[in-house]
Amino acid sequence: MNWQLLYMSGFSHWMLSWGLIVVPLLFIVSCLWSNRLGAHIGPWSIILSPLFYIPLMFVMFSNYHWAIRVLIGLLTAFIMICLNLIQDGEDEELQKTRDKNAVVLKNKYLSLISEDEAAGFSLYLRPFDSTDILQSQSASGVDSRGGYLTLDMESLIERSMSKKFPLIALGKPGEMIGAGRILTSEANWKDEIDILIKNAELIFILPSDHPGTLHEIQLIKDYQLLAKCIWIMPESVSEMGYHAFIGTGVPRFVSKIQYTDFSGLWDKTQKELKTKGVILPDYNSKGMFYKLDESGHLIKTAELALSKKFNKLGAIKNAIEKVNS
């Protein structure tokens, strides 16, 4: 009996000692890897994430009195909340910077400065009600476990374009972690989008039959700019697939996740645009990027299936390169 107690005590101390070193390191690596796969994880979140796992290891493997372990568990939960707030703050600050930069770009072009004085940018055109519903994560287990955040396709496109041609869009600043938002008005938006369309290096379009999107597509046709457009067919996410882990290496809880079957919306948009001389391909539930020639006919496609891909950011980059080559 004494031997068993001694063995268990030694085993617990061994597990605790190694756990305090190995587990935080593993989760730092997982955060860095998740960043590479498409999730944005700020530096403070990565640095401070071991603060969650160190007390957790004491709860799991220490021989402390149960009351002390309960107190450590409560401390762990408090640290988890703090780390999630830090991650949210880092996301918000990064998005504020994108929004400010988007406004600077718009103002430069509205001031009619020469082309060589303005930085290049890519433009994101979409119906406003598509914000934060272009899921790239599988639906499996999200609502029941609450351990994953959404990863919208817009966020992945922004990450893939940020170093070369930053992604900007009209909209409400701070509404989304993705393209830099430019706040506009009903009176001015058509003039502003006209200038942005003419000066964008690359245009990403999520087609719809909404009047605003139809107006933007007509402008692109009138200016004969279909060649610099990448069209987006959104994926209808299923239950099976992969998650790019998002967060600080700790569980993050989601109050609401919205998944959409886009087939009906696509068929409706396809019929509407056909009357305007733009031929959309038939809907593919896996989603795709594609390009049209100046006559409005399909010339290149790249299937996405992001919810089935582990490296979601890499898949987006490869698809952009394929259709834009």
Image: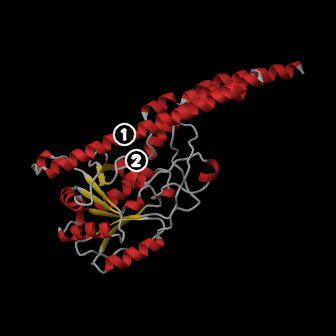
Which residue matches tag 2?
177
- Residue 62 appears in view: no
Within 10 Å of disc 2 (Cα), the crowding (few <14, some 14-19, many 20+) is: many
- What residue is pinned by disc 1? 94
State which quadrant residue 187 falls in. Answer: bottom left
In the rendered image, is residue 178 in sight? yes
Classify 298 as above or below 250.
below
Cα gap from disc 1 to disc 2, whole angstroms: 8 Å
Residue at the far right: name it.
1
Quarter of the picture containing the C terminus is: bottom left
Question: Total number of numbered labels?
Answer: 2
Image quadrant in which you'd find residue 7:
top right
The reply to whether the C-beta atoms of the residues labelled 1 and 2 are less than 8 Å apart is yes
Q: Amino acid at mark 2?
A: Ile
Classify 63 as above or below 121.
above
Left or right? Give the position of 117 relative to 181: left
Decide if residue 297 is on the left or right side of residue 250: left
Relative to 121, 248 lies left or right: right
